[in-house]
């Protein structure tokens, strides 16, 4: 048996696209065969059928209608598959034998452009990796915006993590099978292996219109491997990749993935949503470009004082002028995603409606520039000079694209009247034709006396005169030619109608063709201006971030941070930007932080669970980070020193994302920190050592502290622990300062005051916290006895810290009441036995009396 010709063609094509799901176009369907069909039917819940293929067994097959392909493709690609779209590439009327087909594009996770699936809020990067000797060459590209970055880093896993973490690519291309395997296993990222094109350096020459930074062989290799893959999949010239930005990985703060996650920079730990993240608080951008830019800023805080100051200055200028800030926001609100529309122009997938949107967005630019004019200094003046309002492109679009242009480019209705004499003329014919048809209908009605006679149109029969069965007797002999019989009507034509039909339909067809041609012409002219469009959209993105940070600073009472060069950090009344936002206004308790790089470089923060240690440490890291992205910070005053890296490690049992977190993981992460921190790093260690037994944990924590002080000189660390034994280290080791969170004892319970004060805590208050959590009284009493016993045998730490007077406005009685209220609220009365209920009531009653 032999394969049918169609199947032969299928196999020839599939052979070239083995790592994709091949969508093979057959009539109005895309069909998948064999393994592709089996896979797709499972992933997309499609019915698996079969088709004769010439072999004994039928070929497994499943298909989807061509017009709903978009949704299916989106679902497969977001699941990490690649889809190759195979179309007929010759006119079936002209084909000899089987119609020629070929793949016109391969859609992959890292090159996906469909806005229903790819959020406008973030970039969609694909990465090229090349490894040689002790180094990696890395390239990152977002074809939906035309950004292209390259860098070199040392071939160390930790460096690679940090760099990849800055971009979070969706797909990778590696220079060898081995490297691809490594990348895949480390990042579970769809990774393709491709050979580096020969003479890749030569290939790059002239590829980009501009390059910042120097290209060497590592850069060239990673770039060309990525470009090669993009061209292979997109099958177009990618004219939107105009600029190659070669950057140094040390231009921005490196953060390992854990740190980013722990600090909840762009997503919260619990459900990975944006709500509750730093970005959630900071993002008040008005445009999609600004939104993506801000996300990038948050993920890549700056190190250079000059660049940070430049941003801060711009934010300050806008912060200082509410009127202008509001005007600017207003002007920016009408600016749509120029960057992505422009990329669609380059990829030839833009539709007429999007060109209209582009025009309307460009129409806002003069208003934006107007505001900038009055804020003319520093960075804002630079942006003003750089920003081109692109009035020539606006003019072109305004004269050519109709105000109600459709989303499709092949069915006409695109071109504005007056732009092309030919279009106008054809439209005239069409209009007259329609009028003529209406007149004919009236005339025939009158002639025949049939009131219900009507002239209709369908695609198969064209124009027809329809007369219902009831009126058949009134039809004049010989006047009409019968065309089609329906159940209760007949359809007719006349010679006259036929002639007019040819004219009208001819005009219609010509018009669509003509309009399509004009549309692609306009598109190509815009393609020629891509560099200018991109440059302006970069300006908009930056400007939008500045106004956003100014607005957020005003709304939330942030201050401009200052930088010192003596390594000192002094934050007055600092707040946690996110926790504060989640609470009632004014409920958050602010705290100071004073550190330097010598005698106060290691703060040990003790205090019971839930007292606010973690919040304080995270807020300190966030303030530093916000300052380095160019944002104002939540504090009354902040003088900071620039740090090169922030590390955080959260003790195993505190690790909410949990699951895989074991003590082992905790320790290996601590060891990474110890290896990589420098004298300019900020290290946050939260309950390190908690994942093991008390003595183990305590000893490890102790040794880690000693190590950091000894080997990472100058670094700043915040170390929260419930091992209050560690307070004994102050005075023993140079650089350590004890701090603790104030707690108020209220009768037999405690109230959290959230105030960080010098000195260590003397107790863990574990039992009191347990009580707040509703542990039965019997257990609490017994635990107290055991504790007393243990303390008699052991030794209590020396330094003690008790609240002597009420340091805060909020009375502890209020807090105690609130805790009591909380307990009443959370009682699960329905599941209690009468005795349990009685006991609970008794306890509540006792505690309420104590509060009085
Ligand atoms: P710890 O690390 O000491 O166990 P957390 O920092 O996790 O405590 O804080 C516990 C809760 O206390 C937080 O979820 C927050 O709701 C509240 N909290 C912490 N710090 C403050 C503060 N400064 N002001 C108001 N509430 C706070
Ligand atoms: Mg904590």
Image (cartoon, grey):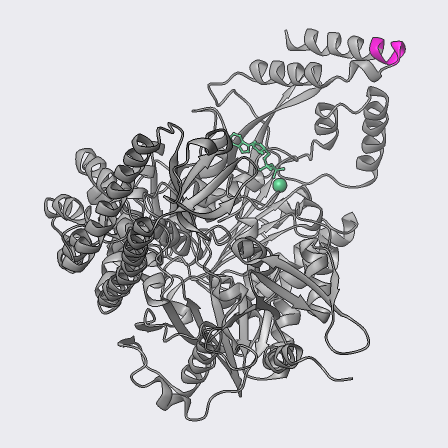
Residue 505 appearing in the image = yes
The residue furthest front is 477
- The answer to whether residue 765 is left or right of residue 268 is right
Q: Residue at x 38, y 29 (%)?
A: 450
Looking at this view, is 430 or 393 the one in front?
Answer: 430
Q: Which residues are magenta?
A: 833-838
Decide whether residue 553 is among the magenta residues: no
Q: Residue at x 67, y 41 (%)?
A: 722
Looking at this view, is 152 or 235 the one in front?
Answer: 235
Q: Residue at x 44, y 51 (%)?
A: 461
Residue 848 lies in what quarter of the image? Answer: top right
Decide whether residue 837 is among the magenta residues: yes
Quadrant hosting ligand 2:
top right
Q: Residue at x 27, y 47 (%)?
A: 335
The residue furthest bottom is 199
- The answer to whether residue 709 is left or right of residue 651 is left
In the displayed structure, 175 sits above or below 114; it is: below
- The answer to whether residue 343 is left or right of residue 680 is left
Looking at this view, is 525 or 98 the one in front?
Answer: 98
Residue 734 appearing in the image = no
Give the x, y percent position of residue 19.
63, 74
Judged by its main secondary structure, the magenta piece is helix
Residue 798 lies in what quarter of the image? Answer: top right
Give the x, y percent position of residue 389.
16, 55
Give the x, y percent position of residue 133.
53, 88
């Amino acid at each position: 048996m032999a394969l049918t010709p169609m199947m032969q063609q299928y196999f020839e094509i599939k052979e070239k696209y083995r790592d994709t799901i091949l969508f093979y176009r057959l009539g109005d369907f895309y069909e998948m065969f064999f393994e592709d069909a089996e896979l797709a039917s499972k992933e997309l819940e499609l019915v698996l059928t079969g088709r004769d293929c010439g072999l004994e067994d039928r070929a497994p097959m499943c298909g989807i209608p061509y017009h709903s392909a978009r949704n299916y493709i989106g679902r497969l690609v977001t699941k990490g598959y690649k889809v190759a779209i195979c179309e007929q590439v010759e006119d079936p009327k002209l084909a000899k034998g089987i119609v020629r087909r070929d793949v016109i594009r391969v859609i992959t996770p890292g090159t996906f452009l469909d806005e229903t699936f790819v959020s406008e809020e973030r970039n969609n990067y694909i990465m090229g990796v090349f490894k040689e000797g002790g180094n990696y060459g890395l390239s990152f590209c977002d074809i939906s915006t035309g950004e292209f970055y390259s860098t070199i880093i040392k071939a160390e896993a930790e460096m690679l993590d940090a760099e990849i973490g800055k971009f979070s690519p969706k797909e990778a291309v590696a220079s060898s099978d081995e490297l691809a395997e490594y990348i895949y296993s480390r990042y579970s990222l769809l990774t393709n292996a491709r050979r580096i094109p020969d003479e890749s350096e030569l290939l790059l020459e002239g590829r980009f219109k501009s390059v910042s930074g120097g290209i060497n062989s590592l850069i060239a290799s990673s770039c060309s491997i990525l470009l090669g893959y993009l061209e292979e999949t997109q099958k177009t010239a990618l004219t939107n990749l105009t600029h190659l930005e070669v950057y140094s990985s040390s231009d921005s703060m490196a953060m390992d993935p854990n740190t980013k996650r722990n600090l909840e920079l762009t997503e919260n730990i619990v459900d990975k949503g944006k709500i509750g993240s730093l970005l959630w608080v900071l993002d008040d951008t008005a445009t999609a470009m600004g939104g993506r830019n801000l996300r990038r800023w948050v993920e890549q805080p700056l190190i250079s004082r000059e660049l940070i100051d430049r941003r801060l200055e711009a934010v300050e200028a806008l912060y200082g002028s509410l009127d202008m800030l509001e005007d600017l926001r207003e002007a920016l609100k009408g600016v749509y995603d120029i960057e992505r529309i422009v990329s669609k122009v380059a990829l030839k997938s833009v539709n007429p409606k999007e060109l209209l949107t582009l025009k309307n967005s460009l129409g806002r630019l003069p208003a934006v520039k107007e505001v900038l004019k009055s804020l003319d200094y520093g960075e804002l003046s630079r942006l003003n000079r750089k920003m081109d309002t692109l009035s020539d492109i606006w003019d072109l679009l305004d004269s050519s694209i109709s105000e109600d242009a459709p989303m499709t480019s092949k069915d006409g209705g695109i071109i504005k009247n007056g732009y092309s004499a030919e279009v106008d003329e054809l439209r005239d014919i069409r209009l007259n034709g329609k009028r003529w048809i209406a007149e004919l209908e009236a005339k025939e009605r009158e002639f025949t006396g049939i009131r219900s006679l009507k002239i209709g149109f369908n695609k198969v029969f064209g124009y027809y005169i329809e007369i219902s069965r009831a009126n058949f007797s009134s039809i004049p002999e010989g006047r009409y030619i019968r065309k089609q019989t329906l159940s209760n009507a007949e359809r007719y034509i006349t010679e006259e109608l036929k002639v007019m039909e040819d004219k009208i339909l001819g005009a219609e067809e010509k018009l669509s063709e003509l309009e399509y041609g004009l549309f692609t012409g306009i598109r190509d002219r815009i393609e020629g201006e891509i560099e200018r469009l991109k440059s302006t959209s970069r300006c908009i993105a930056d400007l939008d971030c500045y106004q956003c940070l100014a607005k957020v600073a005003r709304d939330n009472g942030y201050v401009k941070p200052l930088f010192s060069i003596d390594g000192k950090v002094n934050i007055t009344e600092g707040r946690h930007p996110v926790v504060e936002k989640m609470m009632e206004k004014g409920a958050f308790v602010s705290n100071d932080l004073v550190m330097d790089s010598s005698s106060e470089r290691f703060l040990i923060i003790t205090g019971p669970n839930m007292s606010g240690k973690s919040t304080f440490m995270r807020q300190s890291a966030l303030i530093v980070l916000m300052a380095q992205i160019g944002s104002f910070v939540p504090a009354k005053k902040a003088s900071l020193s620039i740090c090169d890296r922030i590390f955080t490690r959260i003790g195993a049992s505190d690790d909410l994302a949990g699951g895989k977190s074991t003590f082992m993981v905790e320790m290996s992460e601590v060891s990474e920190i110890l290896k990589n921190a420098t004298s300019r790093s900020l290290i946050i260690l939260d309950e390190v050592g908690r994942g093991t037994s008390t003595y183990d944990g305590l000893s490890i924590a102790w040794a880690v502290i000693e190590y950091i002080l000894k080997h990472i000189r100058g670094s700043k660390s915040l170390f929260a622990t419930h091992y209050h034994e560690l307070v004994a280290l102050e005075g023993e080791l140079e650089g350590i300062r004890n701090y603790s969170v104030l707690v108020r004892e209220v009768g037999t319970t405690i109230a959290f005051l959230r105030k960080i004060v010098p000195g260590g805590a003397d107790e863990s208050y574990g039992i009191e916290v347990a009580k707040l959590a509703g542990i039965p009284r019997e257990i609490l009493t017994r635990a107290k006895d055991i504790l007393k016993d243990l303390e008699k045998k052991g030794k209590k730490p020396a330094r003690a810290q008790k609240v002597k007077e009420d340091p805060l406005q909020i009375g502890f009685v209020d807090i105690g009441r609130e805790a009591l209220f909380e307990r009443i609220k959370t009682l699960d009365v329905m599941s209690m036995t009468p005795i349990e209920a009685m006991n609970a009531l008794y306890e509540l009653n006792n505690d309420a009396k104590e509060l009085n």
